[in-house]
Image (spheres, coloured by chain):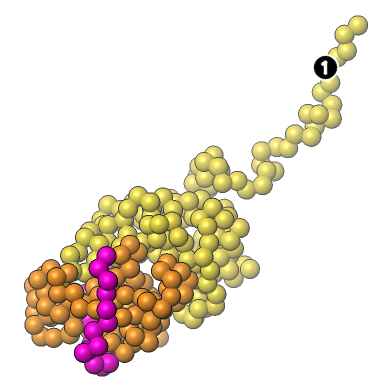
């Protein structure tokens, strides 16, 4: 796994989108839809793919995932839950603005890791792609 | 004269099979399978996740490795309760599974990693009440988490 570094050029209010590929990746709490608690978790690489929100990225994603929705978070929320946001253009399967979220403050696969992932998901909103 | 074979106290001490404490043997699991309809449904859902797993380049790999599903099945075998609400199973990027038992406002949510690590979250009204790492073989803690969700602990 390459060493990842947070992209300091990203403003805190930059929006990151993650495709919600399954219906059960969306939950409804108190009438508000958001990404399910585990959406920003990866069980093997511990790196989670997102895209910097842009018209270009959305257009590319729409061709690959028509009709799907996205979970939206901010760089600030990612940082506050212990993640770095690292650019990874090569990992985006040709879609621009690919980044990975990596948890750096707590041990991988620990209860604190799950807690931070849940915290991040709780800040998310759901939008049409 | 040869003494008669005793049929007394030695045999009387043998316990009938139904009086044995819960076991994690294959035999016990098979018995539970017959008496617990929720288990049949749960195993079917896991099978569907395994079969329907897909790799989404640029998003995440949602294929379920055998290690994860084996751990989930071991967890299920620790729950010796005939009647339960239908659990839900979700595939997570990177081959993990989240298994959830919900009853009213309470959830017992198990996150199972391909490495075999299991984290349990107990939630009330969506808020974390407690969390812990556990071994899938730990029958008491697995079952207690489910009993807590049911309001029976």
Vertical order, B41 against A93 (above or below): above
- Hue used for the chain lettered B: yellow
Residue A64: percent from left, percent from top: 11, 70
Could you say which is closer to the camera, residue B90 or residue B152? B90
Residue A48 is covered by the magenta coloring: no
Asked if residue B44 can be seen in this view, the reply is no
Residue A19 is covered by the magenta coloring: yes
**Which residue reaches farthest front?**
A3
Q: Where does the magenta region start and end?
A: A1-25
Could you say which is closer to the camera, residue A11 or residue B44? A11
Which SS class for mark 1? loop
Locate residue A111 relative to residue A61 in the image: left or right. right
Residue receiving disc 1: B5
- Hue used for the chain lettered A: orange
* Quarter occupied by residue B94: bottom left
* Quarter occupied by residue A109: bottom left
Q: Which secondary structure dominates the residues rendered in magenta?
A: loop
Locate residue B108 relative to residue A124 in the image: left or right. right
Residue B67: percent from left, percent from top: 38, 51
**Which residue reaches farthest top?**
B1
Locate residue B125 relative to residue B18 in the image: left or right. left
Quadrant of the image containing the N terminus of chain B: top right
Q: Residue at x 27, y 82 (%)?
A: A6
Vertical order, B93 against A103 (above or below): above
Q: Residue at x 48, y 51 (%)?
A: B74
Label 1 crowding class (10 Å Cα cut-off): few <14, some 14-19, many 20+?
few
Vertical order, B66 against A68 (above or below): above
* Quarter occupied by residue A43: bottom left
């Amino acid at each position: 796994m390459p060493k990842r570094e947070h992209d300091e050029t990203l403003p805190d209010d930059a929006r990151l989108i993650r495709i919600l590929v399954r219906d059960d990746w969306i939950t409804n709490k108190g009438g508000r839809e958001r990404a399910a608690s585990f959406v920003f978790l990866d069980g093997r690489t511990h790196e989670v793919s997102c895209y910097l929100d842009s018209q270009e990225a959305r257009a590319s994603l729409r061709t690959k995932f028509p009709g799907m929705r996205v979970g939206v978070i901010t760089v600030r929320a990612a940082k506050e839950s212990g993640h770095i946001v690292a650019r990874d253009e090569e990992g985006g399967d040709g879609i621009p603005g690919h980044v990975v979220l990596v948890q750096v403050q707590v041990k991988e696969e620990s209860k604190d890791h799950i807690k931070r992932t849940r915290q991040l998901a709780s800040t998310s909103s759901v939008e049409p792609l | 004269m040869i003494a008669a074979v005793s049929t007394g106290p030695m045999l009387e001490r043998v316990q009938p099979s139904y009086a044995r404490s819960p076991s994690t043997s294959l035999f016990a699991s098979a018995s539970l399978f017959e008496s617990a309809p929720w288990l049949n449904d749960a195993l079917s859902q896991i099978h569907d996740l395994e079969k329907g797993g897909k790799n989404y380049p640029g998003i995440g790999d949602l294929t379920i490795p055998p290690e994860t599903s084996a751990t989930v099945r071991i967890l299920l075998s620790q729950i010796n309760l005939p009647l339960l609400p239908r659990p839900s199973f979700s595939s997570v990027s990177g081959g993990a599974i989240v298994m959830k038992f919900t009853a009213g406002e309470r959830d017992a949510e198990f996150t199972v990693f391909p490495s075999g690590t299991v984290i349990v979250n107990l939630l009330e009204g969506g808020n974390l009440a407690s969390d812990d790492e556990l071994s899938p073989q730990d029958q008491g803690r697995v079952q207690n988490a489910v009993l807590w969700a049911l309001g029976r602990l």
